Amino acid sequence: MKTAILVAIFLAVTPGIPSNCVGCDLARRDFHGADFSGVNYVGVDLSESNLRGARFERAILQGIDFNGADLRDADFRNAKLCWDGHGKWDDGISCPDFRNANVQDADFRGALLCDVRDKQSCKPVDRATLQTGSRSDLAGANLP
């Protein structure tokens, strides 16, 4: 039984990438061109990773650390990126940490702001909310 559960947890679109992960340490790894589409990640550390050209379409990304990552040409279209915690965080809105990340030509158009209590209740996130919530101006990226 445990083996079947572990196998199910670590199956993903790109081999070696978990499809569901809570608190995983994936920092400083080479995921250049990897497909993370549809993953469900909470509190995952992807800091300083090579994610150039990676796809995160339709991914659920809550509390992710992209600090210092190479995200050039990454695709975040229709990803659930920002979360309204209804006062659980300082300003109530939390997005992945993109400080010091290279987001040149990364595509954030269509990224979503969702309710932490109902992950299906989402709306398009606006540029200002994404920049403020991610603690980055996201210079060079394609923003909503």
Image: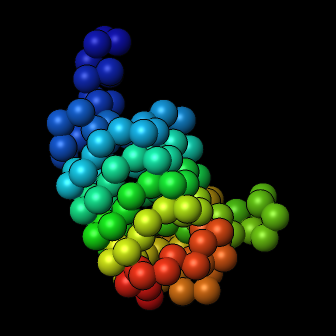
Q: Position of residue 15 (x, y in %)?
A: 17, 36
Q: Quadrant of residue 107?
A: bottom left
State whether residue 65 is above or below residue 140.
above
Q: Which of 10/118 is in front?
A: 10
- Figure colour scheme: rainbow
- Measuring 28% from the left and 70% from the top, which residue is drawn there? 73
- Measuring 38% from the left and 84% from the top, which residue is drawn there? 142
Q: In the rendered view, does 11 fall on the left or right side of 25? A: left
State whether residue 114 is above or below residue 97.
below
Q: In the rendered view, does 57 fall on the left or right side of 80? A: left
Q: Position of residue 71 (x, y in %)?
A: 37, 62
Q: How many marks?
A: 0
Q: Quadrant of the C terminus?
A: bottom left
Q: Quadrant of the N terminus?
A: top left
- Measuring 41% from the left and 70% from the top, which residue is drawn there? 103
Asked if residue 9 shows in the view, the reply is yes
- Measuring 39% from the left and 58% from the top, which residue is drawn there? 70
State whether residue 3 is above or below residue 50.
above
Q: Position of residue 72 (x, y in %)?
A: 33, 67
Q: Position of residue 84 (x, y in %)?
A: 65, 68
Q: Which of 8/41 is in front?
A: 41
Q: Which of 134/72 is in front?
A: 72
Asked if residue 38 shows in the view, the reply is no
Q: In the rendered view, does 106 fall on the left or right side of 23? A: left
State whether residue 62 is above or below residue 129.
above
